[in-house]
Image (cartoon, rainbow, N blue to C red):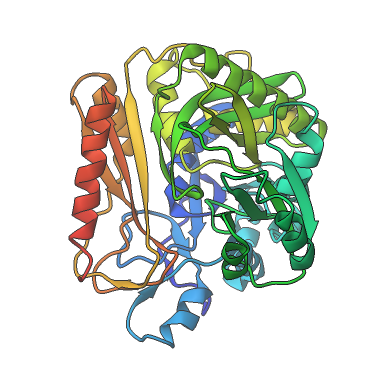
């Protein structure tokens, strides 16, 4: 059990289980899936979560924590350490874990099928090759191929408006190509690797020096595009079941820092209805393309809206978004009782290539729910000298605000805990703020930020 950092799962008689594999920030989605599976299959379902998040303590049941990266990092600074592990490495470690395989064989022996539910489908996942195990999500190799920004731009350039771009194979071609564009693309050149999440492998460059300081590898493939100054960064969450069925969950506004770094989102979007309609139409076209490529499940589309109200595609994330839970909680308070939530829609999309008959999109925000998220990611190691109790009441908070039991609220989720060295690139915590207007949401996010900062040793 050396690869298990923490474990508290207990199997109960007369219960069917599925495995969730991914970060804790999406733990709440499992409750929606648990309820849907219990109803669809007329069985008492529960779930076991396998996550990489290393905390001081866990207010979650049926949890397994695997993160060998933390052991490697601990050797350097000493003391308790929490650090992020690359998603591909985490999935590979889970797939190779003997205790996980033993758990799977035990579950398969007592139930006829075991679902694996993931935040993002990746080829490193091998556990679904075990007889009796199936992946309840997009195909791993399909999702990986479609998350290539280069493949996206090549395929979508004639379908929807896309920013002017070039593809450069290697640093030499990148430098030569950008040298011809500095005068023409005066506002900057967006440079990214083929795969990049939350701006980690991208930059807005204004000179050759910017590029050389950010990227060292000589043989990477780069996507470059003309940077367009813009006031809005909307994102659309959706589910695709087939080429004719694309479900739009909603539109939120992203908070982008320094041009590339994503820190959170707010809902509802401040954009006018005409632009929202265009965003939904373009997302539906992207969904149709994804379906033609064999993709089934939840996805997100990021756009920019320039100062002339033009909507321009930036990227599609062939996976769940970080705000999928918040959209589920919003839909639950806005749709007719019994309407399928996003995990149930994904279940039908993957298993049957369709949506259930009672599927309903949210036309209006009837309860006037406003929310915002903030991901507290650090860019240098910090030491914590305090902790924030782990809240498990996000779903209830949405219900309280929708029913006007509360006018506003904020929650701090997934705080790592006290006496930890937190490695650069890690998330120290996440804030979700709720209210009936954007001002209340902003107030909650500000209070959450101040609270988290009180736990950092200055």
Question: Is any atom of residue 27 visible in this view?
Answer: no
Eyeballing the image, is 253 above or below 61? above
Q: Which residue is at 19% across, 45% downward? A: 447
Eyeballing the image, is 108 above or below 153? below
Give percent across and percent down for residue 417: 27, 65
Q: Camera-side residue: 170 or 443?
A: 170
Q: Camera-side residue: 85 or 56?
A: 85
User: Left or right: 45 with respect to 374?
Assistant: right
Q: Which residue is at 51% across, 80% downward? A: 2
Give the image quarter of residue 78: bottom left
Q: Which residue is at 20% across, 63% downward? A: 455
Q: Camera-side residue: 365 or 269?
A: 269
User: Left or right: 266 with respect to 169?
Assistant: left
Give the image quarter of residue 424: bottom left
Give percent across and percent down for residue 290: 75, 33
Q: Quadrant of the C terminus?
A: bottom left
Eyeballing the image, is 151 above or below 358? below
Q: Which residue is at 53% across, 24% downward? A: 249
Question: Is any atom of residue 282 visible in this view?
Answer: yes
Give percent across and percent down for residue 400: 24, 26
Give percent across and percent down for residue 18: 57, 47
């Amino acid at each position: 059990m050396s690869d298990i950092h923490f474990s508290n799962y207990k199997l109960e008689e007369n219960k069917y289980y599925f495995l969730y594999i991914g970060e804790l920030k999406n733990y709440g989605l499992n409750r929606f899936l648990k309820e849907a599976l219990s109803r669809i299959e007329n069985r008492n379902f529960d779930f076991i979560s396998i996550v990489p998040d290393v905390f001081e303590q866990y207010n979650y049941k049926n949890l397994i924590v695997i993160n060998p990266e933390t052991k490697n990092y601990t050797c350097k600074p000493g003391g308790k350490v929490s650090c992020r592990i690359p998603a591909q490495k985490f999935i590979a470690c889970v797939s190779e874990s003997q205790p996980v395989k033993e758990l799977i064989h035990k579950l398969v022996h007592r139930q006829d099928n075991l679902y694996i539910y993931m935040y993002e489908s990746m080829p490193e996942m091998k556990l679904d090759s075990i007889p009796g195990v199936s992946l309840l999500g997009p195909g791993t190799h399909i999702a990986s191929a479609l998350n290539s920004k280069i493949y996206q731009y090549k395929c979508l350039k004639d379908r929807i408006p896309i920013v002017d771009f070039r593809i450069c194979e290697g640093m030499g071609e990148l430098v030569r190509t950008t040298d011809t564009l500095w005068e023409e693309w005066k506002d900057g050149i967006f440079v990214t690797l083929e795969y990049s999440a939350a701006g980690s492998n991208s930059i807005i460059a204004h000179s050759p020096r910017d590029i050389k300081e950010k990227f060292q590898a000589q043989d990477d493939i780069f996507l470059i595009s003309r940077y367009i100054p813009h006031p809005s960064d909307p994102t659309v969450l959706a589910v695709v079941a087939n080429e004719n069925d694309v479900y739009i969950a909603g539109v939120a506004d992203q908070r982008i820092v320094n041009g590339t770094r994503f820190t959170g989102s707010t809902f509802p979007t401040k954009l006018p209805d005409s632009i929202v309609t265009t965003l939904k139409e373009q997302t539906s076209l992207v969904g149709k393309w994804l379906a033609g490529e064999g993709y089934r499940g939840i996805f997100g589309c990021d756009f920019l809206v320039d100062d002339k109200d033009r909507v321009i595609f930036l990227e599609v994330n062939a996976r769940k978004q970080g705000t999928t839970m918040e959209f589920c909680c919003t839909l639950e308070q806005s749709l007719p009782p019994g309407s399928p939530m996003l995990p149930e829609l994904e279940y039908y999309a993957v298993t049957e290539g369709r949506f259930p008959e009672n599927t309903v999109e949210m036309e209006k925000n009837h309860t006037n729910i406003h929310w915002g998220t903030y991901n507290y990611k650090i860019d240098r190691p910090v030491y914590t000298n305090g902790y924030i109790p782990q809240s498990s009441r996000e779903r209830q908070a949405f219900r309280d605000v929708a029913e006007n039991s509360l006018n506003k609220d904020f929650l701090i989720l997934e705080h790592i805990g006290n006496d930890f060295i937190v490695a650069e690139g890690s998330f120290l915590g996440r804030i979700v703020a709720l209210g009936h207007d954007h001002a209340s949401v902003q107030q909650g996010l500000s209070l959450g930020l101040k609270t988290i900062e009180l736990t950092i040793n200055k």
